[in-house]
Image: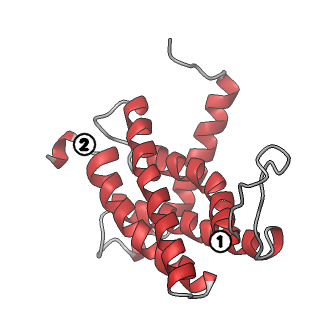
């Protein structure tokens, strides 16, 4: 049985979606000659979400986790420790994951040949891969190469966003026309 939202939630969703589309599409004429609307929307929404991710990660790294080990559930799992760069990434991810899916599903890829449940499953799969890539790159850049967290986060973001764009466009939100 599909989940149905109350009318006021549907109306709120439509108003929010329309507001985002209005703001994003306002700047599209500047980019119309160099990219199609869907690519522009992906770049705009992804750019916002990426900046949010970087900002939240840096904030969490310096002000929440204070460049130290984070021990969640210390009384239950006292030997489980997460280093500050990874804890900061996980913190920002908890915000940017749902925002990213919403943007992709309702702003960027509005016309797809997949059901929402299929898209969500594929999106989760790609995000899981991106999560592993983020983790791996941060561990390599911060611990092995001994780069600063800021530089490591920027380079990691560029690599993972490139993979994500290609995957979301050609796998998660693929249309029949894409074949």
- Which residue is at the front of the view, 102 or 158? 158
User: Residue at position x 56%, y 86% from top?
Assistant: 151
Location of residue 28 (image quadrant): bottom left
Location of residue 146 (image quadrant): bottom right
Where is residue 121 shown, x and y percent of the image? Answer: 42, 36
Q: Is residue 87 visible?
A: yes
Where is residue 161 shown, x and y percent of the image? Answer: 42, 67
Question: Is 50 drawn above or below residue 119 in the view shown?
Answer: below
Q: Residues within 10 Å of mark 2 (few under 14, many from 20)?
A: some
Write down the residue under mark 2.
175
Write down the residue under mark 1.
85
User: Residue at position x 34%, y 71% from top?
Assistant: 32
Sequence-wise, the earlier of marks 1 and 2 is 1
SS class, disc 2 = loop
The reply to whether dot 1 and dot 2 touch (C-beta < 8 Å) is no
Question: Is 69 drawn above or below residue 144 in the view shown?
Answer: above
- Which residue is at the front of the view, 38 or 179? 179
User: Residue at position x 51%, y 47% from top?
Assistant: 101
Question: Is 53 drawn above or below residue 80 in the view shown?
Answer: below
Q: Is residue 86 left or right of residue 40?
A: right
SS class, disc 1 = helix
As drawn, the label of residue 147 is none
- Which residue is at the front of the view, 120 or 179? 120
């Amino acid at each position: 049985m599909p989940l149905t939202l109350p009318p006021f939630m549907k109306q709120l969703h439509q108003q929010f979606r329309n507001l985002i589309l209005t703001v994003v599409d306002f700047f599209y004429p500047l980019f119309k000659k160099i990219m199609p609307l869907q690519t522009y929307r992906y770049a705009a929404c992804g750019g916002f979400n990426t900046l949010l991710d970087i900002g939240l990660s840096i904030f969490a790294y310096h002000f929440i986790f204070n460049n130290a080990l984070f021990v969640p559930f210390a009384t239950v799992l006292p030997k489980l420790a997460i280093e500050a760069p990874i804890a900061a990434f996980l913190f920002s991810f908890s915000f940017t994951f749902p925002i990213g899916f919403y943007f992709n599903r309702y702003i960027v890829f509005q016309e797809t040949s997949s059901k929402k449940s299929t898209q969500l499953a594929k999106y989760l799969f790609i995000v899981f891969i991106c999560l592993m890539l983020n983790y791996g790159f941060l561990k390599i850049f911060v611990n092995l190469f001994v780069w600063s967290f800021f530089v490591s986060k920027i380079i990691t973001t560029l690599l993972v966003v490139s993979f994500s764009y290609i995957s979301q466009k050609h796998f998660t939100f693929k249309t029949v026309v894409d074949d």
